[in-house]
Image: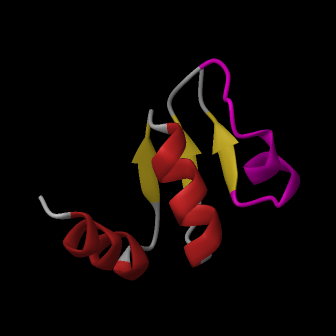
Amino acid sequence: MEFLDFLNLESGARLVLTDSGGVQEETCILGVPCVTLRDNTERPETIDEGSHAFRN
């Protein structure tokens, strides 16, 4: 899928589930809630902003 098409899907989502740090960052910027399906993240700023939660 093309990047802009994917961003359009993300922006219209009510919630995003991901294991991608890049997607975490994108959803944070777009204001879309995100659940990260990983034990850790390289993007701690998304936690500080409260835009997502971790699921172990």
Image point (26%, 74%), residue name:
4
Front position in the image: 45 or 47? 45
The answer to whether residue 20 is left or right of residue 7 is: right
> Residue 15: horizontal and vertical position, in percent?
46, 63
> Residue 24: horizontal and vertical position, in percent?
56, 50
**Chain part drawn in magenta:** 39-51
Image point (70%, 60%), residue name:
51
Answer with the quarter of the image where residue 14 lies. Answer: bottom left
Measured along the vertical axis of the image, is residue 11 above or below residue 28? below
Q: Main secondary structure of the magenta part?
A: loop
Residue found farthest to the left: 1
Front position in the image: 56 or 46? 46
Residue found farthest to the right: 48
> Residue 55: horizontal and vertical position, in percent?
59, 30
Front position in the image: 44 or 15? 44
Q: Is residue 26 magenta?
A: no
Q: Is residue 43 magenta?
A: yes
Image point (43%, 47%), residue name:
17
Answer with the quarter of the image where residue 33 lies. Answer: bottom right
Q: Which color scheme does this rendered protein use?
A: secondary structure
> Residue 2: horizontal and vertical position, in percent?
15, 64
Image point (62%, 71%), residue name:
29
